[in-house]
């Protein structure tokens, strides 16, 4: 698939226009952009290695081409990749508003606005080989079978050390993903950003849904419970202390009241100490953010985190041994302006920017 991808070395606007509908991987770009007459020479300070670099909107219109994540090339497997974006389009584990099955597609669409560097000067496409490897082939009629399919797909992804960056989908997916991740790395630390603890035992008679994944993970020994932090928890509950079970397991619980009107950089310094050098998984539910910023989600809770606090949390994971990340619960039918999907795309890019071995200027 995508046999038309080829090396990209843009020399002029006219050439970019002629090749408007072509897709190029592994750009070999030079140092900085400069002009000579009408000719534009893009230079990117890349190392001598060849990586997949998204086509720049400086030369190719964002609205053109196939909607892959960040306009990266597509490939069918994780072979040869250091990190991979992968979609898991399910919402059959939701208990309130559906629609997260459309999250991967819409996040990819909005990700066309992403560029090659973040504002902290991270250069992921000069550091790692990254691609979009499409979606897990889920079973929308059988959640247990879907979990099996996810687990099997992720076993293959992580087998050779590729770091999955997952585009959800509802939060059920964290359970089978962590089964595959822990199978390779052993029990992992967890940075869990969410309005909800997702540690319920049973909902409507079912043990597998988006409210139970981390309960199942603890039961199966997938988490190093002393290296788990849950940030942004809030909302009404079924008991006086909705987070008692988490604390009993040894999780650090940071309710949203502890986050109000402040930078979370000091908190993340403490989290880095808590996580140490062991493997860590980052799971970010978009409903951690206040619904005024991210309305397109299935279980919104008022009085949430701000987008800059979400970015602070992710950037605060720089230096951790991240072995996987996810961004879940974006529901496009409730996202009338696209801002939730756009925010999700940016948060996923920030996750890429804090993976091990990322170069910074």
Image: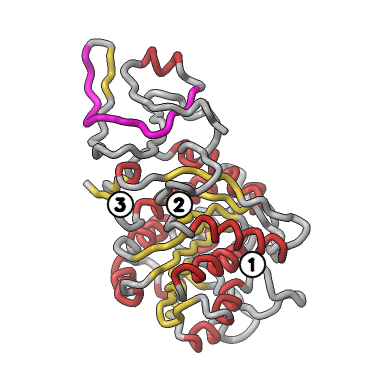
Image coordinates of residue 26 in percent, x first then y, are 38, 34
Q: Which residue: 59% across, 56% down?
A: 153
Between 165 and 2, which is closer to the camera in this rendering?
2
Q: Quadrant of residue 60?
A: top left
> Which comes sooner in the sequence, label 2 or label 3?
2
Q: Is residue 303 visible?
A: no
Instruction: Quote the CA–CA distance across marks 2 and 3.
Output: 15 Å
From the viewer's perspective, tell me whether residue 211 is left or right of residue 246.
right
Mark 3 vs mark 1, foreground winner is 3
| SS class, disc 3 | loop
Residue 141's place in the image compared with 16, above or below, is below
From the viewer's perspective, tell me whether residue 216 is left or right of residue 46.
right
Q: Which residue is mark 2?
A: 348
| SS class, disc 1 | loop
Residue 210's disc number? 1
Would you call the spot at circle 2 few (<14 residues within 10 Å), some (14-19), or many (20 or more)?
A: many
Mark 2 vs mark 3, foreground winner is 3
Q: Which residue: 59% across, 86% down?
A: 240
Q: Which residue is mark 3?
A: 358
Q: Does the magenta segment cover residue 35?
A: yes
> Which comes sooner in the sequence, label 3 or label 1?
1
In the rendered structure, which segment of residues is drawn in magenta?
22-36
Between 161 and 164, which is closer to the camera in this rendering?
161
| SS class, disc 2 | helix
Instruction: Quote the CA–CA distance across marks 3 and 1.
Output: 32 Å
């Amino acid at each position: 698939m995508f046999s038309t991808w080829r090396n990209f070395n843009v020399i002029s606007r006219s050439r970019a226009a002629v090749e408007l509908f072509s897709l190029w991987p592994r750009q070999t770009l030079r140092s900085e952009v400069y002009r000579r007459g009408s000719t534009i020479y893009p230079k990117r300070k890349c190392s001598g290695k060849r990586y997949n670099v998204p086509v720049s909107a400086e030369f190719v219109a964002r609205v053109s081409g196939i909607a892959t994540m960040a306009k990266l090339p597509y490939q069918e497997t994780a072979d040869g990749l250091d990190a991979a974006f992968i979609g898991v389009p399910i919402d059959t584990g939701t208990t309130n508003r559906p629609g997260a099955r459309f999250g991967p597609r819409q996040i990819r669409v909005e990700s066309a606005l992403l560029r090659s560097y973040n504002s902290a000067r991270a250069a992921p496409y000069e550091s790692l080989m990254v691609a979009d490897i499409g979606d897990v082939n889920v079973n929308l009629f059988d959640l247990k079978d879907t979990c099996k399919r996810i687990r099997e797909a992720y076993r293959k992804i992580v087998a050779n050390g590729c770091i999955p960056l997952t585009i959800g989908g509802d939060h059920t997916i964290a359970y089978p993903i962590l089964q595959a991740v822990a199978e390779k790395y052993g029990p992992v630390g967890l940075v869990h950003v969410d309005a909800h603890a997702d540690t319920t035992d049973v909902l409507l008679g079912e043990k597998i849904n988006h409210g139970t994944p981390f309960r199942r993970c603890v039961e199966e020994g997938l988490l190093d419970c002393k290296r788990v932090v849950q940030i942004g928890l809030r909302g009404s509950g079924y008991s006086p202390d909705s987070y008692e079970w988490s604390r009993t397991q040894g999780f650090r619980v940071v309710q949203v009241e502890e986050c109000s009107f402040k930078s979370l950089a000091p908190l993340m310094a403490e989290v880095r100490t808590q996580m140490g050098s062991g493997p860590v998984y980052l799971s970010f539910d978009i409903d951690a953010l206040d619904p005024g910023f991210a309305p397109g989600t299935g279980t919104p809770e008022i009085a949430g985190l701000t987008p800059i606090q979400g970015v602070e949390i992710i950037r605060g994971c720089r230096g951790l041994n991240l072995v996987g990340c996810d961004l879940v619960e974006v529901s496009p039918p409730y996202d009338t302006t696209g801002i939730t999907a756009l925010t999700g795309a940016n948060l996923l890019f920030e996750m890429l920017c804090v993976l091990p071995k990322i170069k910074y200027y």
